[in-house]
Structures are given as C-alpha cells and as structure tokens.
Image (cartoon, grey):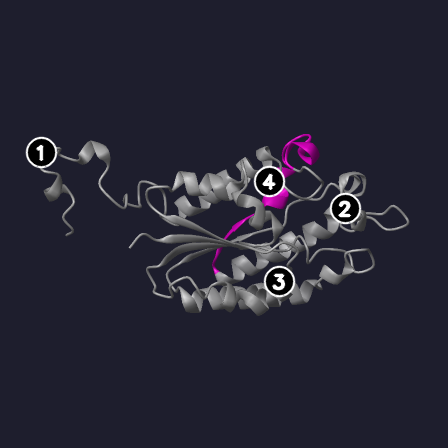
Amino acid sequence: MRPSIVLFGDSITEESFGEGGWGAHLANHYSRSADVVLRGYSGYNTRWASLVAGRAFSAIPASAAAVAAVTVFFGANDASLPDRSSAFQHVPLPEYRVNLRAICALLRARWPSAAVILITPPPVDERARVRLGHPRNGDASGLPERTNEAAGRYARACLEVAAERGLRAIDVWSRMQEFPGWETAFLRDGLHLTPTGNRLLFEEVVFALRDANLSLEALPADLPLCSDIDPNDAVNCFEED
C-alpha cells in the first residue's frame, strides 16, 4: 500500500498546496512513494480542530499502514490576543496544551505507527499585520491582533507537549528568526508564508520525516522505475510479489 503523509493545520496548511507551497513541495518530493493528504482549515484554532479531527480524518483509512506521518500545525490563531480584534480565535495557553494533547491522542489511537510531527506557530511581524493585513488585523488604536511575544509562548508550549509525548517537533518560530530580515523574507503579511518561508518549512519537514525513517531512500517506489523495466519482459517486471 502506498502510504500517506497527512498535513493537519490552519490556513498556513490549507494554502500549502498553492504555487510554491510547502505541501506542494512535499507532494512533489514524495511523488513516487507517498500521497500527501491535505487537511487544512483556515482560521481554525486547536479548540475547533480537536472537535472536528475525527470527521476530518474519516475518509482516510484507519489501517495502521495507511498513514506514515501526520504534521500538526496549529497555534497561530490560538495566540491571537484576547483583547484585540481576533479575540474570537484566542485559546488560553493551558487549553492550547490540552487540545494539542487530545489531537495527538486521537492520531496515536487511529494510526499507532504514524510519526506525529508538531509544528510551532511561526513568528509574527506586528507592523506588517497592521500595515498589510485585513482590517480585522488591527483595532482602532492601530495595535496588531497578534504579537511575536505571544506567538513565542505558544511555540514553547507546542515544544513542551511534543517533548512530554515523545514526538518530533519543528520550531519554526525560532528557526525563522535566526535569519536577518526574516519579517519580509519568510512572511508575506506578517503571519502567512512567502515562497521562501514555504521552502524553509518544507526542508524542515523533510528533515523531520527523514529522522522518522521516512526518507525517499527508505520508502520504495510504488511501481518499478522506467530504468528497471525490461522491454522484452514487461509482464514479469510488473508481477506482484
């Protein structure tokens, strides 16, 4: 069976199959060995995601071999400030931890052998959120609805949940800020990713999958490569073991 890699998250996951998106890069990378399945829900926080996760995965076979890995990428909306214009998306930090644990428990119960990879929320460029974003991104005072400091608290909580559950994690919040000019290099509106930001995340996900023994070398091609087909005995090449 050709395994699946499931991407579960908010808008940064939903748009990942767009041109230059990190999900599209993954689908291309694993084109002969795994199916990349998108489950991205714009605007969702972990509260809503934990409520719908069972329904979101219902069309994906529950057999242990069906899913090789799942990325869980929530927190950007949970970290919205409770007294600003996106307060309806805010989830308190203790509940964020509880919700992440619940999502991870559901995934472990459904696909016990799948590698679950938690991804922290990205950093936030507050000036860009006000300058470039939707009118809801700032209030009458001109303050952003998200801050990088708040996103960092949720990023650390995500890493803590991963550590306590023995799961792999990608600290994209810290990783992006290692580079000068990260605000415009990786973020197109102070939150969502540019093509360069998508490329960085893709590379981090591939590294995590390789660490889970899910590299291209470890996953067999689903059918013989063209170079392995004997044109004089094609039938024998295509026989199943």
Q: Upstream in the sequence, badge 4 or badge 2?
A: 2
Q: Which residue is mark 1?
A: 232
Which residue matches tag 3?
46
Q: Is residue 49 left or right of residue 237?
A: right
Mark 3 surroundings within 10 Å by alpha-carbon count, few (fewer than 14), some (14 through 19), many (20 or more): many
Q: Do tag 1 and tag 2 residues touch (Cβ < 8 Å)? A: no
- Specify few, some or many for label 1: CA neighbours under 10 Å numbering under 14, 14-19, or 20 or more: few
Pointers 4 and 2 in contact (C-beta within 8 Å): no
- Residue 143 in sight: yes
Q: Which residue is mark 4?
A: 175
SS for callout 2: loop
What is the x, y in percent for residue 20?
53, 36
Residue segment shown in magenta: 166-186
As for residue 170 lying within the magenta part, the answer is yes
**Height in image: 196 above or below 18?**
above
Q: Secondary structure at mark 4?
A: helix
Separation of residues labelled 1 and 4 (CA atoms):
52 Å
Distance Cα–Cα, label 4 vs label 2: 26 Å
User: Which tag is nearer the camera, tag 1 or tag 4?
Assistant: 1
Where does residue 228 sit, x and y in percent of width and height?
18, 35
Q: Which residue is mark 2?
A: 134
- First along the sequence among labels 3 and 1: 3
Q: Is residue 49 magenta?
A: no
Say which amino acid is labelled 2.
His
Question: For residue 174, what is the image quadrant?
Answer: top right
Sequence-wise, the earlier of marks 3 and 2 is: 3
Give the quadrant of residue 27. top left
Tell me residue 232's x, y (percent): 9, 33
